[in-house]
Amino acid sequence: MRFSKLARFFLFSALLGLFSLSANADSLYSTSAAAVIGASTADAVSSWHRPELNPVLGSQFDARSVAIKGALAAVSLGFQHIALRHRPDLRRKFTWLNFGTSAVVGGVAVRNWRVQ
């Protein structure tokens, strides 16, 4: 499988996010946040220049779609960060939510690669 420059960039950014989040804290929550970033990146790479069923992302998966998907992941993790400052007891629930989200989004990425 030959990756384009954009696919390499996405994979590099996912790995960078994974290492930076895991290096700053040894908690399971940080690992789950990195999993969300990795799964979102894998989904974006597997969907690039393919028809998109989600009308919010447009008819063809392109740079605009990547920006929307990235913004959704960033807002979700940003909300969690703010909520955890005020309610640290939610860390376990957010951890499970992140791992569940990563599993679903990662499954979609695997499906996209198989359909290609």
Image: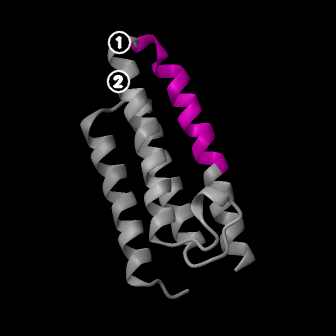
- Residue 49 vertical position relative to residue 37 in the rendered view, above or below: below
Q: Is residue 97 magenta?
A: yes
Quarter of the image where the C terminus is located: bottom right
The colour scheme used here is: one colour
Quarter of the image where the N terminus is located: bottom right
Identified at 55% across, 22% down, the residue is: 93
Dot 2: element: helix
Q: For this rendering, which residue is in front, 80 or 68?
A: 68
x, y (%) of residue 2? Answer: 50, 88
Estimate the spatial distance between the alpha carbons at disc 2 and disc 1, rounded to whole Å. 7 Å
Dot 1: element: helix
What segment is highlighted magenta in the picture?
Answer: 88-104
- The circle drawn on residue 5 is none
Q: Amino acid at mark 1?
A: His
Identified at 40% across, 11% down, the residue is: 87
- The circle drawn on residue 82 is 2
Q: For this rendering, which residue is in front, 63 or 12?
A: 63
Identified at 51% across, 26% down, the residue is: 94
x, y (%) of residue 73? Answer: 46, 45
- Residue 9 vertical position relative to residue 68 in the rendered view, above or below: below
- The circle drawn on residue 86 is 1
Q: For this rendering, which residue is in front, 14 or 65?
A: 65
- Farthest-out residue, bottom: 2
Tag 2 and tag 1, C-beta contact below 8 Å: yes
